[in-house]
Structure formats: structure tokens, C-alpha cells
Image (cartoon, grey):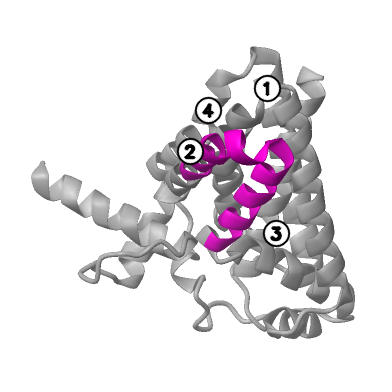
Amino acid sequence: MQLWLKYQLNLFLLALSFFSRLPMAKNLKYSPSKMRRSSRYFPMVGWLLASLLILLYHLVLPLLGTAPSLCLIIIVSLLLTGALHEDGLADTCDGIWGGHSTERKLAIMKDSRIGTYGTCALVMALLSKFILLSALAGQQFLITSLLVAYPLSRAMAITHVQDMQYVSNNIPTSGSKSEPLAKAFSAKELVFVLVTGALACLFLPFITSFYLLLGCIALRYWLKLWFEKHIQGYTGDTLGTAQQLQELLIYTVILASVS
């Protein structure tokens, strides 16, 4: 039992090292197979990040007020994750809207420079996030929304590995950072991902949770069709895009249900 717990902790820390910039122990045991298995803990990383942001919000709210505190937690969220998902959103928008062929779209997505489409998408995503969180704070639903959005958006994003092909320059598996994740979950792993991702929905009214999960599933399948149409699969950047759009959808649905 102790060895099993130690192994699972190592997997969680691998997931945390992938999805955050938090300092990690140097003796983590890494392999591509362990990295793939660690993806089951991506929603748990969301739980940890949301908890840290909520703690920070409570600490600074009496000193700064609502709007500056929200601005601060958005900045800290970017620092904690290294803007990993936001970078994926910008690259995906640049590639999909800036290229005329699949190969060109993938090449643009790999380019470290950001273009007009990516800049607009990034600015609007961050602005929308601030506006939605401000409105949720006014409705006293900010804490619940963060606890729902951070795990659930990550769970929905990682499910794209389940029924899509990983591509890079239109060739499966080519040394990308996301390559070790490019395998489907077992049924048991998938259930764990979805349950840990959606667990905080228990804090919401039933009808809100129903519409929220329905919306997340609909967005997930629309994104699948969108990615398949443009690049015939998914990349690490599109997973980041999926996480960002799912997070914004979650805030929007919760806000609409409590307003």
C-alpha cells in the first residue's frame, strides 16, 4: 500500500510539473509511460491551483478590494501555469486562421512568435475572464466558480486524447512536449478524470450543474470537429485552447444561472 501511494504521489507531482511552474523535488521518477499515466491527475492539479488562488484572494481582498484582487489572481494564475494554456490558445488561433493548409497551420502553431489572431484571442480571453470573475464575485459565486472551472476545464480538455489523433506537422508523434500524453485512457482512468474534474459541481444547484455539464460536452464535441477540420487531430496547443474555452464557458453558464 505504501509503495502504491508513493507511486501515485509521483504521478501527481509529474502532472503538477507539467501543468505548473511550482518547484518540484529533483528525485521525481520520469518516463514517457509514467507521464502518460500522470495525465489522470490533471484535474487534481486544477483543484490545487484553484485552492491557491482562493487563498490568495481571501488574503488580499481586505487590502485591495474586489477588482484589484481579481486582477492579481489572474496574474498569479498565469505565473503558476507559465501561461501554458493561454499560449496554446494564441498559437491555435494564429495557426488555424493564419494558414491555408494543414501543414501551414501546424507550422504556424509551432512558431514562437505571436500574430494578430493570437494576440486578439489572448486579449479577449483575459478580458472576458476578468469581467466574468468580477460579475461572479458580485453574485458571491467566485469561490465556487473557481473550484468548478479549474478542474473541470482541464478534465474536458484532456479527454480529447481519447478519440483524436495527436499530430505535429501532420505526422503522428514527433517529439513534442505533449507526445507522452498522446494515448487514450483506460475506462477506469477516464472515469477518474471525469469524476475528479466534475466533483465541485456538487456545490452548485442541480439545474446549474446539468446545464453546465451539457454545455461542456457540447463545446468539447464542437472543438473536436473544429480541430479535425483544420488539422486532422489535436496538438498540445489545441488542448490549451480547449481548457481556456471550457473555463470561460463554465464561468458564463454559472453566471447566467445565478443572475
The stretch in magenta equals: 52-79
Q: What amino acid type should be assigned to the residue bearing mark 1?
A: Gln
Residue at 55% of width from left, 66% of height from top?
82
Q: Main secondary structure of the magenta part?
A: helix
Can residue 54 be seen in this snapshot? yes
Earlier residue among tags 4 and 1? 1
Q: CA distance from mark 4 to mark 3?
A: 22 Å
For label 2, count other residues whose C-alpha is less than 10 Å away and answer few (under 14), some (14-19) or many (20+). Answer: few
Q: On the image, numbered disc 2 is attached to which residue?
A: 55
Query: Which residue of the protein is positioned furthest toward the top in this rendering?
Result: 206
Q: On the image, numbered disc 4 is attached to which residue?
A: 200
- Determine the secondary structure under disc 4: helix
Q: CA distance from mark 4 to mark 1?
A: 16 Å
Kindly report which numbered mark, 3 or 2, lies closer to the viewer in this rendering: 2
Q: CA distance from mark 4 to mark 2?
A: 17 Å
Residue at 58% of width from left, 54% of height from top?
77
Q: On the image, numbered disc 1 is attached to which residue?
A: 140
